[in-house]
Amino acid sequence: MDQSSLQDSRAIQEVCLNLMATAPVCYVTTLDAEGCPCTDALGNLRCAQEYPSLAPLYEQADNKFLLYMSTDMQSAKVARIRTDPRVCVYFCDPKQIVGFMLGGRIEIVLDRTIKNRIWQDGWTMYYPEGPEGPEYGILRLAPTIVKGWCRNQPFELRP
């Protein structure tokens, strides 16, 4: 990779990470039993304004594009993930002409310490039994590919 490409890659990575830090929502696509894509909107736990207490989780990560998401463990989405963990998560800002997807295998977090660390005040409206309840779940994606469009060019990054 030449110096110019390396600089472009770093600049694109920075644009993507900034969008992840500001977008309130991300879109998760899973595959159903027939292989049909199913997309759900989820709150973006990397959004610094919405979840400032979670920023250290991402700063310490080996994968710069690591993403945690909260979800209802009894949802159809989780059932699809249990069958096929291949997913993509999409972020987009049409004003910046930036859109990209994170692709890889998602995992259901079982570690109670991480789940408790991510738990937010006010989430009992979604998970009435709190962080110990059966409906509260955390998903973790450490993507193996990041690809999309940044202003005037397509790109692909390997975190």
Image (tube, rainbow, N blue to C red):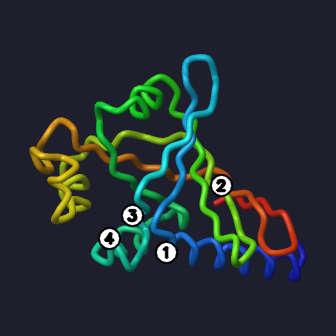
Q: Amino acid at mark 2?
A: Met
Q: Dot 1: few (<14), some (14–19), or many (≥20) neighbours within 10 Å?
A: some
Name the residue: 22% across, 49% down.
126
Nearest the camera: 116 or 120? 120
Q: Please state the horizontal and vertical placement of residue 31, each as a whole percent of the image.
A: 58, 29
In the drawing, what numbered circle is on residue 21? 1
The outermost residue toward the top is 34
Q: Quadrant of residue 102?
A: bottom right
The quarter of the rendered structure image containing the N terminus is bottom right
The residue identified by callout 3 is 45
Find numbered disc 3 in the image and state the secondary structure of the residue it sits on.
Answer: loop
As shown in the figure, which amino acid type bears the numbered disc 1? Ala
Q: Is residue 11 above or below residue 88?
A: below
- Disc number for residue 54: 4
Q: Quadrant of the C terminus?
A: bottom right
* Residue wearing tag 2: 101
Q: Position of residue 149 (x, y in %)?
A: 78, 64
Q: Position of residue 15 (x, y in %)?
A: 66, 78
Looking at the image, do the residues carrying marks 4 and 2 touch, with CB atoms under 8 Å apart?
no
Identity of the amino acid at label 3? Leu
Whichever of labels 3 and 2 marks the residue nearer the N terminus, that label is 3
> In the rendered view, would you say 129 is above or below 73?
below
Please state if 152 lies on the left or on the right of 125 as rendered: right
CA neighbours of label 4 inside 10 A, class few (<14), some (14 to 19), many (20+)? some
Q: Please provide percent x and percent y for residue 60.
A: 40, 71
Q: Earlier in the sequence, mark 1 or mark 4?
A: 1
Image quadrant in which you'd find residue 148: bottom right
